Image: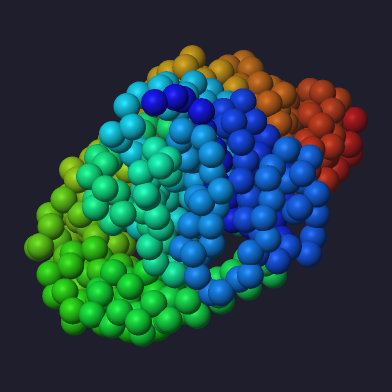
Amino acid sequence: MGSSISLAMIVKDEGQVLGECLQSVRDLVDEIIIVDTGSRDETLEIAREHGARIVGYLWCDDFGAARNESLRLCTKDWILVLDADERIAAEDLPAIKRLAKGPAAFAYEFTTRNYSNATNVADFTPCAPNDPHARGFSGWHPSTKVRMFPAGAGVRFEGKVHELVEPSLARARIAIEACPVPIHHYPRLKDTNRTRDKQEMYLRLGHDKVAQNPTDPKGYIELGNQYAEVHDYEKAAGAYREALRLDPSNALALRDLGGVLHLANRSEEGKKALLLAVRLDPRLAGAWRNLGVIYLDQKQWPAAVESFQNALKADPGWADGYRYLSIALESHGDFANAAEASRKALLSRPDCPECLRLYIHQMLRLERRKEARETLQRLIDERACVAHVHNALGELYFYDDRLEDAKLHFTRAGRLGSSAGYNNLGVVLMKEQRYSEAAAAFEQCLQQDPSHHGALSNLQKVRNRI
């Protein structure tokens, strides 16, 4: 089989995002097939600029049917499916090209990183420091499905909404392999009205789907997820309960039910669902996380500690796990272990101000300033440009009256963009009675943050002494 690739897409009013999507794969695909379901913005013009073949399609409330029309038009050896608000990083294109040179006996599933600031979503993963794909979002949550498969094998999408090719692949006896390349998905970059309209359409189609197949628990889970996305937690809970009526041992449905019940201020019910979820599947990290949060809210510290420990055991890569564990341990009065947990949180996420504040607070409480300084210096040695770490290290030196070291790190923090660093530098200079230099430091702070009240007050004090 050859290695040429068709890109298959369905679009409607995607002018805000389509160009960047097509640009991201221009060196990967050999043709672009776009099925348009009624765009009124500049979508079609952008598609033409990228050499796409465009076909109009009368929308019939069926995503699967529209996608199958795009598949019908593809002429190359492989089909890659993307949405307009998705991207593939340039460094990952060679890996996909290598897959396309392989046998046609395989289809490939990709993990999509759905970028968001919704930290309460199950499996939320914070973005790494300086992640070039973060685009201002604090993290992402994963979803996995087949995105690339051989053409000519009769593969089709099934489902009016949340459509998939997996059932079709199973019938065609095409094995599914995992592809390590992530797809970067930015649904929140779109206009808020467009996002709301799409959410409402998904809800309507989700109801149609469960009406057509009322004995399929997956349809109710998808509907619950959609209600949770629009923050209608009561209706989300109702949908998850319907799924559990059909499949009482579905641990994932219990996990999500427990999460939305907690968000709906029904924590006791949520706790019962989550306890049943982890009894059915002790490896379900998201259920342990949600359970730990409920125990924290209820001030049941030992139970919170145990839940977060189990979550980390099930998912050692949970970046925020040690911070949550540290909070629970401190609340339980175990400051020594809390500090060790917050140290691990800070080392894994040096960009996280909450992790830094928690660690410094606990180490000051334990009077272990020298050890804290060594930890922060290690971070600086490994990641030289972390302004708030320099500022915190300067404060630790200031506590021990090591003013030259404090000034060094406050200066570096200020130069890296920390207004607090310049204000703290001014405080040290003011203590040394170097009032003109202190005034200059406070002025630099105010250039970065004109509303910094501490710098405003301090500047007035030193001016009165000059």
Residue 406: which quarter of the image?
A: top right
In front of the other: 52 or 353: 52
Viewer-closest of 225 and 389: 225
Look at the image and tell me whether residue 176 can be seen: yes
Q: Is residue 256 left or right of residue 309?
A: right
Percent position of residue 116, x then y: 53, 53
Image-based side of 454 in relation to 130, left or right? right
Q: Is residue 151 left or right of residue 390?
A: left
Residue under the image location 54 percent in, 39 percent down: 75
Question: Residue 287 location, x and y as percent?
Answer: 24, 60
Q: Position of residue 197 (x, y in %)?
A: 63, 73
Number of numbered labels in the structure image: 0
Q: Residue at 18% across / 43% down in the picture? A: 313
Which residue does the image show at 43% across and 76% down from the upper left? 206
Q: Quadrant of residue 51?
A: top right
Q: How is the image coloured?
A: rainbow
Residue depicted at x 39% and y 77%? 209
Out of 385 and 58, give the one closest to the viewer: 58
Camera sees residue 456: no
x, y percent for residue 14: 69, 56
**Quadrant occupied by the N terminus:** top left
